[in-house]
Amino acid sequence: ESEAEDWPSRFYEIARTPELYQDRFIILSAGPYSATPAAALALTEEDWLRRSLTVRLEHECTHHFTRQVLGSMRNSLPEELVADYMGIVAAEGHFRSDWLLRFLGLEGSQYRHGGRLENYRGRPALSAGCFDLLQIAVRRAIDNLASFRAPGDKARTIIGLSRLGLEGMATGRITI
C-alpha cells in the first residue's frame, strides 16, 4: 500500500491525538498586573513592570496546570486566588496579601469599585448583601493564605489549594 493510499487512515489516527498537531501558547501583556499602578505598591515603574510580568506568567501557567492536571480552567474566584497566590510568590519569593487585596479591590475597609472581585459577582449578579459576604470570605481566605507555608512543590501547592476551594481557604488554617 502506498503512502498516498494509507493517508486517510493515518490522518484519522492523527486527528484522534490532538497533542500531535495542536499547540498552546500563553501570550502575556507587558503592562502593570491587574491595572495596579506601581505607586500603589511603593515600587518603581520599571520594577513593577518586571514583577508584573512574573506574576502574570505564573498566574497563567497555574491556570494551564489546573486545566492539564485537574481538568478545569475556569474563570472562578477560587482558581483566581490560587493563580494570584502562585504569581505573587514567584515575583516576591513570598506571599504578599496586600498585593492580592489590592488586585481584588479589597485594600481598604470598603470595596474599591473597579477591583477584580467584581468579575466574580456572577450572572445574575450577587445582591449587595451577598457581595458583602463574599468580600468577608475572600478577606479571610487571603488572611489564611498569608499564614500558609507552601510545601515547596508547586504542583502540590496548586492541587492542594484548588481542592480546598474558597470555603476551605476561608474557614481556617490552611494545610495541604
Image (cartoon, rainbow, N blue to C red):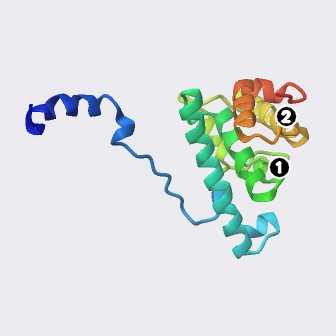
Closer to us: 56 or 90: 90
Closer to us: 154 or 14: 14
Residue at horizontal 82 percent and vertical 55 percent from the top: 93
- Relative to 164, say whether 26 is above or below: below
In which quarter of the view is residue 57 placed?
A: bottom right
Q: Is tag 1's residue or tag 2's residue first in the polypeptide sequence?
A: 1
Query: Disc 1 and disc 2: Cα gap in Å?
Result: 15 Å
- Relative to 13, say whether 34 is above or below: below
For the C terminus, give its image quadrant: top right
- Residue 169, image x, y percentages: 80, 29
- Residue 64, image x, y percentages: 55, 41
- Relative to 67, say whether 90 is above or below: below
Q: Looking at the picture, which amino acid does disc 1 mark?
A: Phe
Is 144 left, or right, of 9 in this rendering?
right
In which quarter of the view is residue 175 placed?
A: top right
Which residue matches tag 2?
Answer: 140
Is 59 left, or right, of 71 in this rendering?
right
Query: Which element is circle 1 on?
Result: loop
Label ID, residue 95: 1
